[in-house]
Image (spheres, rainbow, N blue to C red):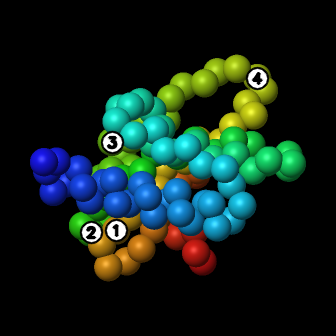
Amino acid sequence: MPNKNYRRGVAIERKVKDYLEILGYTVIRAAGSHGAWDIIAVKEGTTEPVRCIQVKRAATLIGARRARLKHQFPNMESGFQPYQQELWVWVDRKGWLHDVESEGLTNPSK
């Protein structure tokens, strides 16, 4: 049986997946990949970039900032980038903090 942290992580990834599907995205959850991104989201019929999302969970805002400092976006040095790298951190009892390619943590619902 998976451990408690793993189950919490999966639950948070599913929240992201469900939320993006409501917004009209086609979403792939890269379960067990241990790769750079947990979620890949595409909005067909638009010019929006593909959203490549790493999902983390933290108990406090300090933990969220620590997760941001530890997270490194993959270095993609090509000129044209048809995708957007994002870090979403779920903070218990606070909600989402969101970081798009090192713009800093913000709350996407505000």
Q: Residue at the spot x=45%, y=64% of the render?
A: 15
The total of numbered circles placed on residues is 4
- Choose mark 1 or mark 2, whichever is in front: 1
Q: Looking at the image, is mark 1 or mark 2 earlier in the sequence?
A: 2
Neighbor class of circle 2 (other Cα within 10 Å; few <14, some 14-19, many 20+) is some
Q: CA distance from mark 3 to mark 2?
A: 15 Å
Amino acid identity at mark 3: Lys
Residue 64 point in image, percent of width and height: 34, 60
Q: Residue at the spot x=49%, y=44% of the render?
A: 29
Is 50 in front, or is 64?
A: 50
Is 62 in front, or is 49?
A: 49
- Choose mark 4 or mark 1, whichever is in front: 1
- Choose mark 1 or mark 3, whichever is in front: 1
Q: CA distance from mark 1 to mark 2?
A: 6 Å
Residue 85 point in image, percent of width and height: 58, 41
Residue at label 3? 70
Amino acid identity at mark 4: Gly
Neighbor class of circle 3 (other Cα within 10 Å; few <14, some 14-19, many 20+) is few
Is disc 2 placed on a helix, strand or loop? loop
Is disc 1 placed on a helix, strand or loop? strand
Q: CA distance from mark 3 to mark 4?
A: 26 Å
Amino acid identity at mark 1: Val
Residue at label 1? 91
Name the disc covering residue 60, or none: 2
Marks 4,1: beta carbons within 8 A: no
Q: Does residue 62 appear anywhere in the picture?
A: no
Q: Residue at the spot x=85%, y=49% of the render?
A: 46
Amino acid identity at mark 2: Thr
28 displayed left or right of 31: right
Neighbor class of circle 4 (other Cα within 10 Å; few <14, some 14-19, many 20+) is few
Residue at label 4? 79
